[in-house]
Amino acid sequence: MSTRRFEWLLVALLLAAGCASKAQAPKRELSERERDSLIGVSGLPGGTVVTRALSTSDSMAARAARQNAQTQHSGDESQGSSP
């Protein structure tokens, strides 16, 4: 009889362990750009405007990076070597 009781206790413990809440990984917060990108593709009214704004922002950032690179490059040439 004690073997049967042990088996039932083991089954009850396994069931309780299986029903226990699982530890969830902490949720990572989205950056502003990621949130805006999700809004743009969501189909919400005005989402296409958000997508265009992100595209414009990207092109302006690329343009600024190109201008900075040109300025740094031309600044290197203008310094030259001093006699």
Image (cartoon, grey):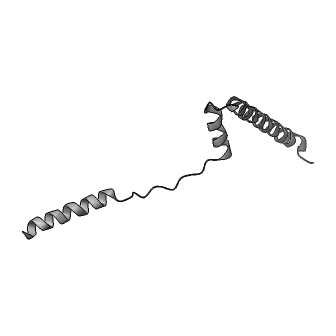
Judged left or right of residue 17, residue 6 is left
Closer to us: 50 or 54: 50
21 to 60, vertically: above or below = below
Where's the N terminus, which quadrant? bottom left
**What percent of the width, then of the height, locates residue 46?**
70, 31
Farthest-out residue, right? 83
Q: Residue furthest bottom?
A: 2
Tell me which corner region of the image, top left, top right, bottom left or bottom right, holds residue 58.
top right
Nearer-the-camera pick, 16 or 39: 16
Q: Residue at x 82, y 42 (%)?
A: 72
Residue 25 location (% of width, % of height): 47, 55
User: Which of the 4 image quadrants contains residue 50?
Assistant: top right
Residue at 64%, 32% in the rendered image:
44
Quadrant for residue 78, please give it.
Answer: top right
- Residue 61 against residue 17 in the figure, above or below: above
Q: Residue at x 89, y 44 (%)?
A: 79
Q: Is residue 39 left or right of residue 6?
A: right
* Residue shown at 20% from the left, 60% from the top: 11
Compared to residue 78, the image places residue 47 above or below, namely above
Q: Residue 80: x and y, percent?
A: 88, 43
Count of numbered marks: 0
Q: 42 or 56, which is in the foreground?
A: 42
- Taking the image as shown, residue 79 lies to the left or right of residue 58, namely right
Q: Could you tell me residue 48's position as x and y percent?
A: 69, 29
